[in-house]
Image (tube, helix red, strand yellow):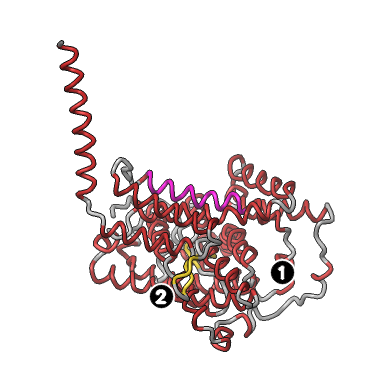
């Protein structure tokens, strides 16, 4: 991977500790809106989310030799898996909290997949391993993730379309016309703005905030994986793991894309040094650790890469400072209570944009990779991924039972896409192209003969 060196500040402390702290707060703002939105959507703990976003980031930096300026926040890719497992669990008589605990075990197993990929990359090299996960598989998977989530966003918006539109408008205006730090925190501004309008309209009851403590632990025993061990429903546990683990294929590809983006922004090849296997292990460890305590899966955040590009401050220490701020906020239950009172329509408005952006990223991956859809094998792979993920989500309540195992649409789509890409011969493309060109050539010869006559 050829990287051009970039001019930037690699030691932010030379700017003075005041500016160093402000830069850290800026990175906190950049990740904040999207990170807290995941627990707000799924029902997971906001405090635990902030705690393990911070701890996960610090663990990632430790494993990647403190070289990569990346922040790890909540992953949106797993939301569909969380919601699917929660719905199935509640239907079987479990509480929402316990069902989410089962989903977290599935996410823990997904985090272990990162170590498998890291070992393969370390042993065989990046190119040999990634050929099984080309853009024709990962692109449609990312598209499907956004589209399968869109229904929940619309459902939230319908509770109050005015608040949803306010959130959408603020995000768009801040993203396109704002400058400086305002431009890089449009999601946070959309949430705050819509929330404030809801409060002025009397749509929010803040009476419970006064009862919340200023200090408390970010998680409880009931929010950990220990609850799953005590419940001991092995059938549902197996279903949860199988439903969520395949999503790791998509998030691993997302991680690789983010590492390429950060490398390009900073001007250093982080895929070679400290190595993609190290960054994958850091991401996987952060995800597995968070899931054990009821927090969402982690992923490297593109929002913070945008901050790097804007400020040209490439010091990883600034990211670690932002992680420490996130950890401090996680010990404030009063803050978590304020987040819990956020109107559903506010979340829905912001979600509409975020979910659409997820799908747009998948489209961009396909376009940038020049995936040729005149080749029938590519059409088959992409088509089945999309139709299975979306069709199972809305046509089968996002659950297909194979014996006692329940698979989500995303899980089925990932498995089918990877298998099809592996077994369908590349020669199929050549035969298709030759067939098309042959027919065109035949028609051209027939036209020439008719013209001669």
- Confirm whether residue 173 shows in the render: yes
Mark 2 lies on residue? 112
**Residue 249 location, x and y as percent?**
39, 64
**385 w.r.t. 323: above or below:** above
Is disc 2 placed on a helix, strand or loop?
Answer: helix
In which quadrant is the C terminus drawn? top left
Query: Quadrant of the rendered structure where residue 388 is?
Result: bottom left
**234 w.r.t. 336: above or below:** below
Mark 1 lies on residue? 335
Q: Is residue 413 left or right of residue 377?
A: right
In which quadrant is the N terminus drawn? bottom left
* Residue 161 part of the magenta segment: no
For image coordinates 42% across by 72% down, the residue present is 282
Which span of residues is magenta-colored? Answer: 351-367
| Disc number lying in front (1 or 2) | 2
For image coordinates 62% across by 59% down, the residue present is 33
Query: Quadrant of the rendered structure where residue 40 is?
Result: bottom right
């Amino acid at each position: 991977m050829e990287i051009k060196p970039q001019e930037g500040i690699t030691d932010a402390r030379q700017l003075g500790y005041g500016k160093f702290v402000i830069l850290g707060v800026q990175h906190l703002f950049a990740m904040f809106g999207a990170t807290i939105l995941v627990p707000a959507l799924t029902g997971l703990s906001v405090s635990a989310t902030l705690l393990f976003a911070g701890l996960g980031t610090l663990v990632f930096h430790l494993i990647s030799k403190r070289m990569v300026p990346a922040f790890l926040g909540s992953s949106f890719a797993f939301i569909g898996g969380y919601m699917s497992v929660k719905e199935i669990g509640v239907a079987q008589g479990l509480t929402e909290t316990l069902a989410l605990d089962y989903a977290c075990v599935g996410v823990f197993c997904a985090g272990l997949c990162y170590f498998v990929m890291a070992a393969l990359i370390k042993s065989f090299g990046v190119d040999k391993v990634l050929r099984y996960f080309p853009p024709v598989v990962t692109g449609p998977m990312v598209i499907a993730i956004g589209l399968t989530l869109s229904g929940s966003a619309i459902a939230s918006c319908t509770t109050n379309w005015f608040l949803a539109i306010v959130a959408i408008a603020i995000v768009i205006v801040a993203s396109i016309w704002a400058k400086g730090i305002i431009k890089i925190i449009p999601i946070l501004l959309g949430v705050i703005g819509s929330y404030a309008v809801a409060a002025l309209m009397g749509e929010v009851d803040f009476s419970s905030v006064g009862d919340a403590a200023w200090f408390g632990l970010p998680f409880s025993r009931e929010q950990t994986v220990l609850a799953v061990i005590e419940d001991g429903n092995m059938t549902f546990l197996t279903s949860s793991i199988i439903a969520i683990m395949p999503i790791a294929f998509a998030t691993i590809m997302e991680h690789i894309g983010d590492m390429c983006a950060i490398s390009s922004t900073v001007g250093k090849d982080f895929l070679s040094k400290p190595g993609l296997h190290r960054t994958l292990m850091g991401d996987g460890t952060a995800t597995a650790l968070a899931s054990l305590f009821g927090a969402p899966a982690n992923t490297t955040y593109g929002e913070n890469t945008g901050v790097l590009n804007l400020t040209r401050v490439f010091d990883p220490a600034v990211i670690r400072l932002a992680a420490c701020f996130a950890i401090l906020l996680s010990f404030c239950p009063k803050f978590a209570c304020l987040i819990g009172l956020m109107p559903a329509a506010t979340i829905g408005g912001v979600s509409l944009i975020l979910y659409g952006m997820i799908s747009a990223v998948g489209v961009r991956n396909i376009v940038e990779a020049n995936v040729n859809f005149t080749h029938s094998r590519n059409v088959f792979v992409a088509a089945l991924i999309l139709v299975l993920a979306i069709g199972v989500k809305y046509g089968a309540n996002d659950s297909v039972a194979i014996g006692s195992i329940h698979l989500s649409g995303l899980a089925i789509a990932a498995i089918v896409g990877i298998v099809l890409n592996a077994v369908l011969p590349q020669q199929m493309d050549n035969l298709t192209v030759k067939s098309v060109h042959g027919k065109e050539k035949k028609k051209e010869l027939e036209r020439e003969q008719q013209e001669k006559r």
